[in-house]
Amino acid sequence: MSKETRYSVCTVCDIGCQLRTEAKDGKVTRVIAHDNPMLAKNICFKGVAVPQIHNHKERIKVPLKRVGERGEDKWEEISYEQAMDEIAEKLKVLVDEHGPETLAVSTSGWNTQTTHSTDRRFMNLLGSPNWISGVSLCAGNTAAVNRLTYGWYPMADYGNTNCIVLFGHNPRKHSWTPIFNAINAAKDRGAKVIVLDPRISDQAETADLHLRLKAGTDAAMCLGWLKVIFDEELYDKEFVSDWCVGFEELRQRVDEYPLERVEKITGVDKALIAEAARMYATADGASIPWTPITDQQISSTSAIRLHSILRAVTGNLDVVGGDTLGGFNPSYIPESELGLHEVLSPEQKAKQMGYDDHPVYTYRVAEMLKEPTEKVWGFPYADIVMGCHMANPTNVFRAMKTEQPYPIKAFIVLGNNALLSYPNQHQILEAMMNQELIVAHELFMTPTAMLADYILPGDVFTERNHVADSWSWTTRLTLSQKVVEPPEQASSTYQFWHDLAVRFGFGNEFPWQSIEEVLDHRLARSGRTFREFEEQGFMEMPIPEYRKYRKTGFATPSGKVELYSSILEELGFDPLPYYREGPATSPEYPYMVFTGVREDPFFQTGQRNVKELRDRCPAPSVFIHPEDATRDGLNDGDWISLETPHGKVSAQLSVQSSMKQGHLRVPHGWWYPEMRGQESLAGAFLSSDAVLCSDDDEFLDYEQGIPHFKGFPGKVVKTEKPEHLQAAS
């Protein structure tokens, strides 16, 4: 009996923990902690469950072609070559009829990992700018907005920081485990932690300060902090004078937010607001790590910009213990280069959905930042965390549905359950039903895959080699080794795009015949092959260099930190950050709903079909405060219908004293794999938070087109346990 153990970078979630995978006789048997003591704690029960995921009996292992009506879930097995031939033939017909922009692609780099930006490479060679991803709502859009202020996307220096500010972000033992451990290590050193969250979250329970702000008011809170910092002269005067533009204009805007006003908006006592602002501003090295909360608000662009501004004016930008600007790793060709963004013509870039009305993370801004990015970072396109050259998902799905301003008739989705991953799920379904070609590259029969014409089985991280670089968010390189062979008919996302490119005559631009050849190419800048890299160790990190701006300036049009954004001004938006009220509650809809909360056993819409994980969380739970539950005659464990003006879902009620009164917490991504064949699309519309949130223009962030997930009106109504769940239980 043969047995081997290899290093792995886990892709069950997006944090990329370094683990070890054991296999016997060609089958993954166990995932265990890393053998490096610094990494050994970075393992959660999702990672431990990898053998049950990768060896799952329902894993798709052969290509499938739809034989029934779209969504009817009827298939025939075909060969990979036949599937690729037919996909290419049908896509060519659609491109000839409607132009290359008729193709839209939705993907998740977290899960697919080994695309190496060849999805963008193929699309740019073809001429389509309509690439979307869940990173438009999570980290990718944050990267794009940060670039407006100082030209890159920083990472918190957890190892040296003395103050950590968590805006709603709640890393836990089994969710973003490395960050959870890093925060704990910082606290053990004496670092302070400030949490801003309506709930008494896990992080809030042990924080030095907890500000229980009203959901969706983060931008107002930041303006209040700046008011304290400016009035009490707690800002870094030398850095602001030498390296910032727009300080006086910003100060005038901040003066519009006295603490009395901020207290009224956020519901937090002004004395506590001031105390938190002082704690952050006076710390010797303070960080504001990324958070998904400010990614998903009606004031998202301003809230993200305000985080970047706070880092800058307090002197915490690119310093020890602050938030550091990494840049491209000099030893590894970044995905930004592999994507061939330079070959897409200006005319086709201008057709990108969102280019005109919500341009911040589209090609429109990427082109405006091209020259300073090349000057500072050495290459004109910086597609950090895949989020800086995207189309707007709402605009894409509207065009798929209405065929305006032009028809989008082909949709390719890879490792991404798109139906449940963006707002306004009803519109997404209509959009997909109006397609002439849908291709899903997947592991399991998701609701999105059920709507496809072709399903191609994908590989998983234990079945491929990789060098992970965090999509240029950090400069660290980590090793992930192939442990077992994938199913015979499965393909990596790289192979899919390579083989499609060959059928379109782009073979010369895809010269690498395997993932290992791609890795050899990417490592060539350091004079190594993949085999040489893996022989040298499991990870490498360049020695950090701080205050790099003193040599290069910042990658903005002015070369400085733009507190007053010249790009936003040129685009016709407010160049200064602001707070915008979200939709208000009413007697009919008295609760403030915030959606998108992740449950520890799952990542996004995945793992509901994995018994070991599903047993930990059998049904979706909506959280409510005890006093609210008592007033409405509700009890813990009741089944309820949560309704908003836009939609409704069924869930179990969980009465939690940690909740803020008047608020409802809704989990993300629920569907029911066990109901396949009993309920349409495996119950995709029964409990999914994506049906609750509108993406009408009035509810979108102006600059990005981001929906307001964090605080919209809703109500709860007691109901019986749904019949479909009774039958399934």
Image (spheres, rainbow, N blue to C red):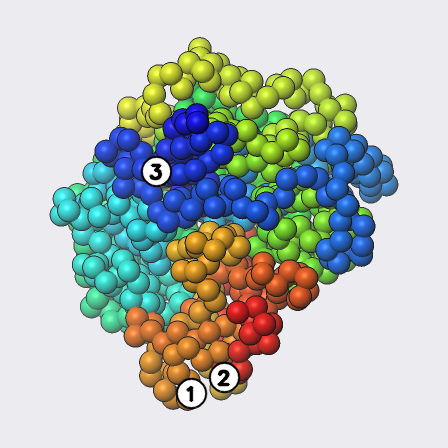
Residue beneath disc 3: 32
Q: Residue at x 57, y 68 (%)?
A: 728
Residue beneath disc 2: 718
Q: Is residue 495 at all visible to an observer of this figure?
A: yes
Looking at the image, is mark 3 or mark 2 earlier in the sequence? 3
Q: Residue at x 20, y 59 (%)?
A: 206
Q: Position of residue 721 (x, y in %)?
A: 53, 78
Whole-angstrom CA distance, mark 3 to mark 2, is: 44 Å
Q: Position of residue 318 (x, y in %)?
A: 30, 35
Looking at the image, is mark 1 or mark 2 earlier in the sequence? 1
Q: Is residue 592 at all visible to an observer of this figure?
A: no
Give me the disc on residue 632. 1
314 and 179: which one is in front?
179
Looking at the image, is mark 3 or mark 1 earlier in the sequence? 3
Whole-angstrom CA distance, mark 1 to mark 2, is: 9 Å
- Name the image quarter holding residue 499: top right
